[in-house]
Amino acid sequence: MLDLVVKVLQQSNMLTHKLPELMPGGFFIAIDVTCQKIIHNPVSARFYRIEAWKSLSSSSSPPPQFKVYHDGRLVRIEDLPIQRATWLGEEVTGEEYELIWPDGISKVGIFNASPLRNDNGEIIGSICTFEDVTQIVHMKRELNAHKLNLQEMIEERTKELKCEFEKRERMEREVAKLERLNVIGQLAAGLGHEVRNPMTTIRGFLQMLQYKPDLIIYKSYFDLMIEELDRTNLIITDFLSLSKNKPAELKQHCLNKLLANLFPLLQADAFSQSKQCIFEPGEIVELDIDPNEINQMVLNFARNGLDAMPKDGCLTIKTFMEGQNIVLSFKDEGIGIKPEDVIKLGTPFFTTKESGTGLGLPMCYSIAERHKAKIEVMTGPDGTTFLVQFPQLKGMNLL
Ligand SMILES: Nc1ncnc2c1ncn2[C@@H]1O[C@H](COP(=O)(O)OP(=O)(O)OP(=O)(O)O)[C@@H](O)[C@H]1O
Ligand SMILES: [Mg+2]
């Protein structure tokens, strides 16, 4: 059947004259074995940006200005389809090449090539057809770029949402923590009052009885009972300070001076445990604080830091400005806090210490709340830093 088609085409000169012109695809032919002369049909000429039936060959000198790429790599002349077909006798099918001109124009085609032989089987040139897929490829690239853009946007938004979610969770935990503190504080305020009165009576009688001559042999027992009562009383005092209703007695103070007064006590504490304590006061503005409460807070943070460190560890206390905030920081070289414990910090009675009551941090959070300050904790295997961020009063100058 194919023979018949060829015969008809040959008889009508169709093959040589009309067919290349009628073909919807690109068509070009190397008419010498050196591939110096390559003639292009109208579709191919448009693709190569030349006039129809003119010669354009990468093998001629000088070669055309466009560069050819295959799979993203620059292609050498001898690796182009028509040259491979003519010089090596190779058949090329369905290979995609991109042509890029110096003015930025890019065209993409899918090429087939086949050598042309004479009756003796010698190669006399080659023929190449191609389909211009520039539009499809460019659209695909644009789509891919959009896809990448979208993916990046989705990833970014997901990250933002995750951050927001974590922030909200943290805030909800903080609120729940403070609410718990308030409930406990209010309960403590009522109970504390009721319990303290009988305790005072008991303490008074114990004190009186311990000096009775016939009870003097029990003096050590009396001392122990009074000590335990005092400890209980202290816990009740701590409890009471958790109450939100406790009025804050805030007065303008210099935080650095307050810390400087307290520092010898902290140093002595550290020294007795063969540890170090450093105080680095920064330039900060005055603050409205309750000095007693801040003292209590500093002692709690400092003692926790010292407790967490092995011998020779160093606790650094600093004050500094961060934007509009006055920051008080406690940095220890301790063992850090386990992630599962970080969320429990500030929960009354949460302690990992044998003799701890777990009221130190709840008190710190409660005091911070009364000072409108925020507590942040950063922890890792190299130690823990607690930051207390006080909001700056309006119109305050640096000290
Ligand atoms: N700087 C720190 N490094 C490591 N763990 C810490 C630090 N500060 C607090 N913690 C952990 O938080 C827990 C609770 O601290 P918190 O001060 O409330 O109670 P406590 O120190 O155990 O007892 P106390 O009531 O005597 O202060 C501690 O038991 C400890 O596990
Ligand atoms: Mg403590």
Image (spheres, grey):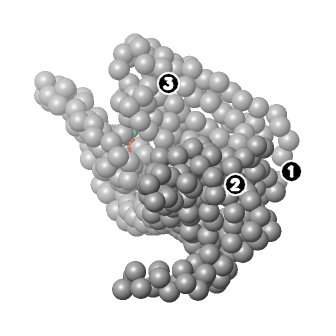
Provide the secondary structure element on which disc 2 rests: loop
**Can residue 250 be seen at all in this image of the molecule?**
no
Image check: 392 left or right of 231? right
Q: Position of residue 306 (x, y in %)?
A: 42, 26
**Hey, what amino acid is under mark 3?**
Leu
Q: Residue at x 43, y 19 (%)?
A: 313
For numbered disc 3, what is the local secondary structure?
strand
Q: Ligand 1 sits in which quadrant?
A: top left
Q: Which residue is mark 1?
A: 395
Q: Tell me if label 1 and label 3 are in contact, CB under 8 Å.
A: no
115, above or below 296, in the image: below
Residue mark closest to the camera, 1 vs 2: 2
Disc on the earlier residue, 3 or 2? 2
Query: Closest to the observer: 317 or 162?
Result: 162
Please report whichever mark, 1 or 3, sits nearer to the chain's N-terminal start. 3
Given this view, does label 3 or label 2 mark the residue nearer the observer?
2
Q: Position of residue 130 (x, y in %)?
A: 57, 69
Q: Residue at x 68, y 72 (%)?
A: 41
Which sits earlier in the primary sequence, circle 1 or circle 2?
2
Badge 2 residue CB within 8 Å of ligand 1: no
The answer to whether residue 99 is left or right of residue 219 is right
- Can you tell which mark lies on residue 315? 3
Q: Nearer the viewer, residue 140 or 290?
A: 140
Residue at horizontal 62 percent and vertical 72 percent from the top = 26
Identified at 40% across, 80% down, the residue is 3
The residue singled out by tag 2 in the image is 37
Which is more foreground, mark 1 or mark 3? Answer: 3
Indicate the amino acid at tag 1: Gly
Please state the horizontal and vertical placement of residue 173, each as a whole percent of the image. 43, 62
